[in-house]
Image (cartoon, rainbow, N blue to C red):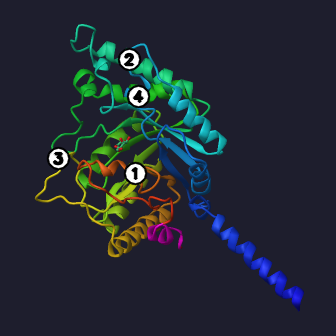
């Protein structure tokens, strides 16, 4: 009898510790990868074991964007990227590449001749091609999926493409070429189009139309990335379901590439702190509960569309630091993730793993 009790105690202890060792990625192993966007800096041992426990995919938060990786015409800065790639490999994780062609965080020189005048289309093509070949080519054995083109669709109802510098100089054709060059540089990688506010039905139909045109031209595009910078007040369950349903008709891989949930109503434009309407909101129990419920709905739908969704990446590690602390309002603290500032799971974590 004494032996039986001891065996029972040991079994309980072991299964308890097994449960504790289970991370987010383990709960979702039959569904999709779980990723995290990481800065290029040194990580503590605690952080490293936290990453290893919960995630099996990494995106560089900034290090691969044009400005940091290609600051000057003849200078690439690969050191921070290489160190992230090394961490990712050490932890046996996959790596997503982000991003090869984006109108933001691209240095001025990219669009200018030495005398300061704007380059012509042929020069832009040369530069973009060289950039894509160099960056995507360097990591062709390390990065399995690239956000090739980011955010080219306009938020304005009556405008199709965003009037970016790329578009002003080259029209929309450079988009086709960007995918073709990326495919040439890294033939095995899955190539994505990535954008935000895809919940908006008008913007969504423009994205779908653009992708269908690319598909009809046999441009190598394999996936659609939904950034998913969402908020407590949206999207609703039906908006998200409609969004996933619409995108799944494309027959492409869907990835949730930059998930977070602001506790403030969603705004897409950066603006100054406005004392008449802005204040730091405390992360109360009510907010924690509402956020947990909302996260549960998002993940219920992700699971429902698991045939199409291959990866869900969170944008940033924990509530200790999020880009939303400075966007859209500078210095306004936000709490958008599943883990608190001490890397402890929040209520939202519990609802996301409870299925
Ligand atoms: C966009 C970009 C990301 C990141 C976020 C904010 O979603 O795709 O790289 O810059 O904005 O951090």
> What is the magenta segment's predominant secondary structure?
helix
Residue 117 at x, y percent in the picture: 21, 12
Of the numbered discs 4 and 3, the one sitting upstream in the chain is: 4
Image spot of residue 60 (x, y percent)? 48, 39
Which of disc 1 and disc 3 is earlier in sequence?
3
Question: Quick one: label 3, few (<14), some, or many (20+) residues within 10 Å?
Answer: few
Q: Which mark is residue 206?
A: none
Q: Secondary structure at mark 1?
A: loop
Quarter of image, res 158: top left
Label placed on residue 68: 4
Q: Nearer the viewer, residue 263 or 342?
A: 342
Quickly name the residue at label 3.
Answer: 272
Q: Are marks 4 and 1 in contact (CB under 8 Å)?
A: no
Q: Tell me if mark 4 has few (under 14), some (14-19) or many (20+) residues whose alpha carbon lies within 10 angstroms of its own.
A: some
Query: Which residue is identified by label 2?
Result: 72
Q: CA distance from mark 2 to mark 3?
A: 30 Å
Q: Around disc 1, counting alpha carbons within 10 Å, would you say few (fewer than 14), some (14 to 19), or many (20 or more)?
A: some
Which image quadrant shows ligand 1? Answer: top left
The reply to whether callout 2 and callout 1 are in contact (CB within 8 Å) is no
The quadrant holding residue 127 is: top left
Q: Dot 2: few (<14), some (14–19), or many (≥20) neighbours within 10 Å?
A: some
Label 1 beta carbon less than 8 Å to ligand 1: no
Residues at discs 2 and 4 in contact (Cβ within 8 Å): no
Q: Is residue 86 above or below residue 250?
A: above
Give me the disc on residue 321.
1
- Mark nearer the N terminus (2 vs 3): 2
First in residue order: circle 4 vs circle 1: 4
């Amino acid at each position: 009898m004494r032996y039986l009790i001891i065996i029972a105690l040991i079994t309980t202890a072991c299964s308890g510790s097994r449960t504790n060792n289970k991370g987010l990625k383990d709960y979702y192993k039959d569904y999709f990868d779980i990723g995290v966007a990481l800065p290029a800096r040194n990580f503590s041992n605690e952080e490293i074991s936290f990453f290893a426990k919960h995630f099996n995919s990494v995106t560089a938060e900034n290090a691969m964007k044009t400005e940091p990786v290609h600051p000057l015409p003849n200078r690439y800065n690969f050191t921070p990227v290489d160190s992230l790639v090394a961490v990712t490999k050490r932890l046996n994780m996959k790596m997503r590449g982000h991003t090869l062609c984006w109108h933001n965080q691209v240095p001025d020189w990219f669009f200018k001749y030495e005398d300061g005048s704007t380059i012509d289309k042929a020069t832009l093509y040369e530069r973009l091609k060289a950039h894509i070949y160099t960056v995507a080519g360097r990591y062709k054995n390390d990065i399995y999926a690239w956000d090739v083109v980011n955010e080219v669709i306009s938020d304005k109802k009556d405008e199709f493409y965003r009037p970016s510098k790329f578009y002003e100089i080259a029209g929309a054709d450079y988009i086709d070429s960007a995918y073709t060059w990326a495919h040439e540089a890294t033939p095995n990688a899955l190539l994505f189009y990535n954008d935000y506010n895809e919940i908006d039905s008008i913007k969504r139909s423009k994205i779908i139309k653009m992708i269908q045109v690319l598909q009809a031209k046999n441009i190598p595009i394999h996936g659609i990335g939904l950034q998913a910078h969402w908020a407590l007040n949206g999207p609703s369950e039906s908006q998200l379901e409609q969004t996933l349903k619409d995108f799944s008709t494309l027959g492409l891989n869907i990835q949730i590439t930059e998930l977070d949930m602001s506790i403030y109503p969603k705004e897409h434009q950066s603006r100054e702190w406005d004392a008449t309407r802005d204040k730091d909101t405390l992360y109360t129990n009510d907010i924690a509960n509402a956020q947990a419920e909302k996260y549960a709905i998002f993940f219920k739908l992700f699971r429902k569309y698991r045939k199409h969704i291959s990866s869900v990446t969170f944008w940033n590690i924990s509530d200790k630091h999020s880009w939303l602390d400075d966007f859209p309002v500078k210095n306004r603290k936000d709490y958008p993730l599943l883990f608190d500032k001490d890397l402890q799971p929040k209520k939202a974590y519990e609802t996301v793993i409870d299925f």
